[in-house]
Amino acid sequence: MAGLAHRVPDLGALELLLAVARLGSFGRAARELGITQPAVSSRIRSMERQLGVALVERSPRGSRLTDAGALVTDWARRIVEAAEAFDAGAQALRGRRDSRLRVAASMTIAEYLLPGWLMALRAERPDTAVSLLAGNSATVAERLLAGEADLGFVEGLTVPPGFDSAVVGHDRLVVVTAPGHPWARRRTPLSAEELASTPLILREEGSGTRQVLDTALGGLARPLLELSSTTAVKSSAVSGAGPAALSELAVGEELSARRLVSIPVAGVRLDRTLRAVWRTGHRPTGPGRDLLGLTRG
Amino acid sequence: MAGLAHRVPDLGALELLLAVARLGSFGRAARELGITQPAVSSRIRSMERQLGVALVERSPRGSRLTDAGALVTDWARRIVEAAEAFDAGAQALRGRRDSRLRVAASMTIAEYLLPGWLMALRAERPDTAVSLLAGNSATVAERLLAGEADLGFVEGLTVPPGFDSAVVGHDRLVVVTAPGHPWARRRTPLSAEELASTPLILREEGSGTRQVLDTALGGLARPLLELSSTTAVKSSAVSGAGPAALSELAVGEELSARRLVSIPVAGVRLDRTLRAVWRTGHRPTGPGRDLLGLTRG
DNA sequence: CTCGCTCATAAGCCCAGGTTATGCCCTCAT
DNA sequence: ATGAGGGCATAACCTGGGCTTATGAGCGAG
């Protein structure tokens, strides 16, 4: 149950494994990470002990992954990628007000999209310091007007007066079920009435996605379960507890792995436009322009 | 650059943060994780120091996340989810031969799909021990024939004689570019000739996805870059180095965040069927049946 | 044969994260 | 009003994991 951390090697060990896999030698991996070769040797060994599987085939001419090692490395890579997104976001969150680019963003965007953009921005312009301020749409507008932010991102239907904007994406709410659910075999889209009259697995009242749904249905969403995190909603849906309504951004992976299936819905406005905004006439330049470029293509 | 592990809290700390967020109190989180309250207090504090952001608002009646803390917690949840998938896979990899369910799977499936299935299976039947053996399609067939595995998963066009099978999904190769690439604006699908004559970012020769592409194009794929990991291919494509060909399973998140755009292709067979297989007449029962149910819906 | 690369082992240091013991603050019930 | 109890913080101490340096042993190329 608890103690994931005791069964999964820590991030340092996973990075180390990736380096060994990429470079083909303990020594080279050690040099790249700025540690010594015995440190690598011991760490990989203790990782193998922890997992109970041989990961690396040592030879006097270098090291190669075993089959199991290749698999473990691929899984590890996903953890490290999530950690990189975390790092990009956290760094912006800490960013002091004197950063080159000050961004204010609403929660959905800050949660799902911004880390990716920041990683891409860092790849193109490694020296750009970004600071992030997260809040609701009203907060974002305030910060921009007060000159405390250079660029904002908001979700919603309207752009407040005094701002220019560019669409950067859509937050589509999708209705999903486990592949075994009867709805997964439907050929005809769900109607608004069916959706409103069927109990759904939902986030708690007051959450962003819940508000979108309530508005779209006219305040009628009926909960089968009310859960306080997107992950909890997802896992309930995956395990077949019933249909759930979630942001498309939250279920990308589950959909492509078919752990969840998206059910078409007709006649309900589940789209929410995601926009970059800035004060009229203050179209962002420099790093802000670069970031904007990443979001629009 | 290096030292992600020094900037990102370790898994234990992230789990702790999630527990505090969920339970609303340091003490309750401590009890749930089987440690003491001062340990929680100190760990959260050092996490806040490390990130340079206040995450939790302490009060004499409990603790709530700050805005920044909510964001950090969401990002952390993604790392922990990836770690759970890692754990599910690693546990099966270590699994002794006396497990209740012995699975043999080819690489693509073991890498992308199996951890999710195993997590779902564990949610439904927590007591099922699964062992995993990864290899190529031939290895999978051998293990099944030798009675060393109860259920196999393979990718490919044909089912070897002596086996029954069920389709569990498709591994579609997709051509992707950064949203800024000219191809992203095309209205007409790419033809096979265009695809074969344009240099692409690819995995190295010998890799599974490369083989699929070579076969589909008649052995002609022309590399713009040859990289040794899917991640490397992805990040090159994201940063605009050119079009890449990748398994759809590898780019789910990038597509929904529009860091990458999928380019339609016409007249090329980029589908590979993913199948569960078992010896004719030995249709899996018990836990194998359960797992099969998860994959087919 | 010796150099240069590989990895393994051993002995010692240090700090992060755990423990127990305690104190302060606030709220609620007697 | 006054304890009781739950909330978090602080201090002193212990342990172990991960690092270092120093060394050895296997293999291949010049």
Image (cartoon, coloured by chain):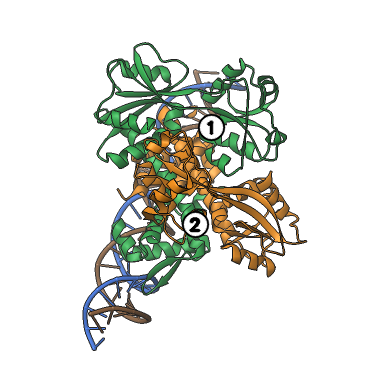
Chain colours: A green, B orange, C blue, D brown
Judging depth in this view, the residue of B186 and B113 nearest the camera is: B186
Judging depth in this view, the residue of B262 and B222 nearest the camera is: B222
Disc 2 sits on a residue from what chain?
B
Amino acid, disc 2? Gly
Q: Name the residue under label 1.
A: A248
- Horizontal placement of B137 versus A119: left or right? right
Residue at point 50%, 38% (across, down): B18
Residue at point 61%, 42% (across, down): A259
Amino acid, disc 1? Glu
Q: Name the residue under label 2.
A: B218
- Horizontal placement of D7 versus A224: left or right? left
Residue at point 38%, 42% (across, down): B238
* Alpha-carbon span between mark 2 and mark 1: 37 Å
- Horizontal placement of B56 versus A223: left or right? left
Q: Mark 2 or mark 1, which is nearer to you?
A: 2
Query: Could you tell me which quadrant the C terminus of chain B lies in?
Result: top right
Judging depth in this view, the residue of B274 and A252 nearest the camera is: B274
Q: Decide: is A274 above or below C3.
A: above
Can the viewer see residue B16 in this picture?
Answer: no
- Count of labels shown? 2
> Residue B114 at what x, y percent from top left?
59, 52
> Residue A273 at what x, y percent from top left?
47, 23
Label 2 neighbourhood size at 10 Å, few (<14), some (14-19), many (20+)?
few
> Residue B214 at what x, y percent from top left?
48, 56
